[in-house]
Amino acid sequence: MPKRQHQSTMHKEIARPWTAVHRVGDAGLLLQFGTDLGEDSNDRVHQVAEAVLDAQFAGVVGVVPAFTTLLVEYDARRLTAEQLLEWLQVLPMGRSRPRSARTWDVPVLYGGNAGPDLEVAASQLGLRPDEVVSLHGAQIYRIYCIGFAPGFPLAGLLTPALRLPRRAIPRTRVYPGAVAIAGAQTGIYPLATPGGWHLIGRTPVVLFDWQDTPPCLYRPGDRLRFRAVSEEEYHALKASTSPVRLCEVRE
């Protein structure tokens, strides 16, 4: 029988970085770190995620960090939710401050075939396409988490002037390297997958490579800097004899 998608709140008063704990199904605990999409909350999510993984507690099978939540998955045959929560309450948190963030340069060809949604998105936002490009490249974005596909950086937060809901009809296939926006987030499709974000450009760099170590260079907490390039530069990078990977920005 399939697992029940039951979720209930476990009322515990705990002096920990999270603000609430919820049971998810029969093999998960969801730790809530408030509702603010700020960097402090997200830092705490990843601090606890790393502490859980480093501890290698018997019965814990994985963690899924998100913007303000952390799902801790466990083997219900070896561990109960109550035992896991008791362990989490005394878990050493390790680093009190997040690790140093790296900034990655992302060359982007905006508009045209590379960004088929740019003009429509600009119209919906009441902007010109060049204004969308300028605003998108004007700030550096934090990677809050990675998902829904391997290596997909969920980054933000977009300026309110660029925020649009997802497309009403998602695409069945989005090409690798597509640079997109949706809601308060921006991201890059590393692989060919379905997707419902607005495609405003494309990068020639390879974001995720199963044969490389690590397969993805960036981590949550790192930054992305989008840089507009000409069609000539884009195709020159694309034509490279070896896959072009992201370059770290050295200040």
Image: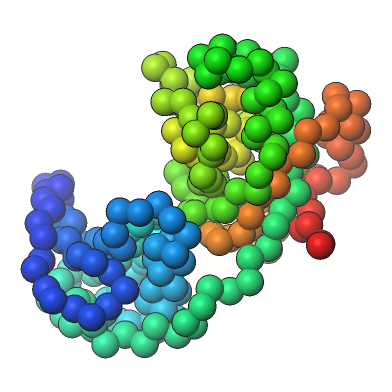
Pinpoint residue 147: horizontal percent, then vertical percent: 47, 48
Q: In the rendered view, does 219 fall on the left or right side of 183?
A: right
Residue appearing at x 41%, y 69% in the figure = 44
Instruction: Tell me if residue 186 comes above or below residue 36 in the rendering.
Output: above
Pinpoint residue 99: horizontal percent, then vertical percent: 58, 74
Q: In the rendered view, does 79 fall on the left or right side of 214?
A: left
Q: How many tags in the picture?
A: 0
Pinpoint residue 126: horizontal percent, then vertical percent: 55, 15
Residue appearing at x 20%, y 65% in the figure = 20
Residue appearing at x 26%, y 87% in the figure = 90
Query: Would you identify the image quadrant in which residue 111 lies?
Result: top right
Query: Would you identify the image quadrant in which residue 212 lies?
Result: bottom right
The residue nearer to you, when weighing 52 against 222, is 222
Instruction: Tell me if residue 220 comes above or below residue 75 in the rendering.
Output: above
Residue appearing at x 77%, y 58% in the figure = 248
Pinpoint residue 9: horizontal percent, then vertical percent: 11, 60
Q: How is the image coloured?
A: rainbow
The residue nearer to you, when weighing 15 against 167, is 15
Residue 182 in view in this figure = no
The residue nearer to you, when weighing 91 against 72, is 91
Q: In the rendered view, does 3 fall on the left or right side of 33?
A: left
Image quadrant in which the C terminus is located: bottom right
Instruction: Tell me if residue 118 comes above or below residue 38 in the rendering.
Output: above
Residue 238 in view in this figure = yes
